[in-house]
Amino acid sequence: MSLAVGQFLFQHRSVTPIPILVFGIICREEPYLIAILFLIVGELIRLSAVAIIGGISRTRDDSVGPLCTEGIFSISRNPLYVGNLLLWSGFLLLCGNLVIMMCSLIFLCLQYHAIIQWEESMLLNAHKERYIEYCQETSRYISLSSYRPVTSKGVVPILRTERGTLLAITAGVAMIGWLQCI
């Protein structure tokens, strides 16, 4: 995929999965309890990342922040997207249609991969050799062998930054639960 596609998907990443959720709700079967675990783990990963990266995780422009290499960023260069994938997996499981789930996850994996390639080009441009070293030490997606601890910035700033995601999770679960009762 081109970097332009990655940039476009990056700027619209909050809304591109919404049609998938709507379609999944319409075509749902039975929900799975494992979905709640996916939602919790996905958001815990996101909270761990936001604790380090801060509010820049919410930007839609091409500004580049500091290179984060500790904590969850020592396990994955892209923990926000790993967390997002788990969150969407949880929502899609709640919808209950495995065909839609698989098609949606393929789409999301392709979308996040394109965004990651675009972001990596930006980080390489900004951080040069330091980013190359980081890439050699840390997996793009997940590896437990390279963990480096970090001190937390406190819970309140993290929750303030993640309030949109937490509200979306709550609204999504409530909507799916309500539709299950209809």
Image (tube, rainbow, N blue to C red):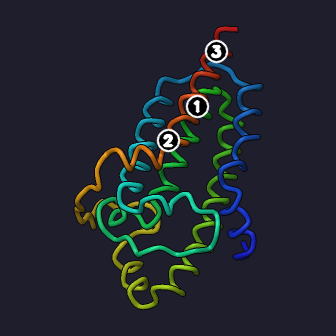
Contact between marks 1 and 2 (CB within 8 A): the answer is: no
Residue of label 3: 178
Q: Amino acid at mark 1?
A: Leu
Q: Nearer the viewer, residue 93 or 59?
A: 59
Question: How far apart are the two marked residues, 1 and 2, measured between alpha carbons?
Answer: 23 Å
Give the residue furthest to the bottom: 129
Looking at marks 3 and 2 on the same chain, the residue that comes earlier in the sequence is marked by 2
* Mark 2: secondary structure: helix
Badge nearest the viewer, 3 or 2: 2
Q: Residue 85: percent from the left, percent from the top?
A: 55, 48
| Circle on res. 123 | none
Q: Residue 163: percent from the left, percent from the top?
A: 50, 41
The quadrant in which residue 121 appears is bottom right
Q: Nearer the viewer, residue 86 or 72?
A: 72
Question: How far apart are the two marked residues, 1 and 3, measured between alpha carbons?
Answer: 15 Å
Q: Is residue 18 left or right of residue 117?
A: right
Looking at marks 1 and 2 on the same chain, the residue that comes earlier in the sequence is marked by 1
Q: Is residue 126 left or right of residue 17?
A: left
Residue of label 2: 163
Q: Considering only vertical position in the picture, is 94 above or below 102?
A: above
Residue of label 1: 93
Near mark 2 (Cα within 10 A), the count class, few <14, some 14-19 or many ≥20, is few
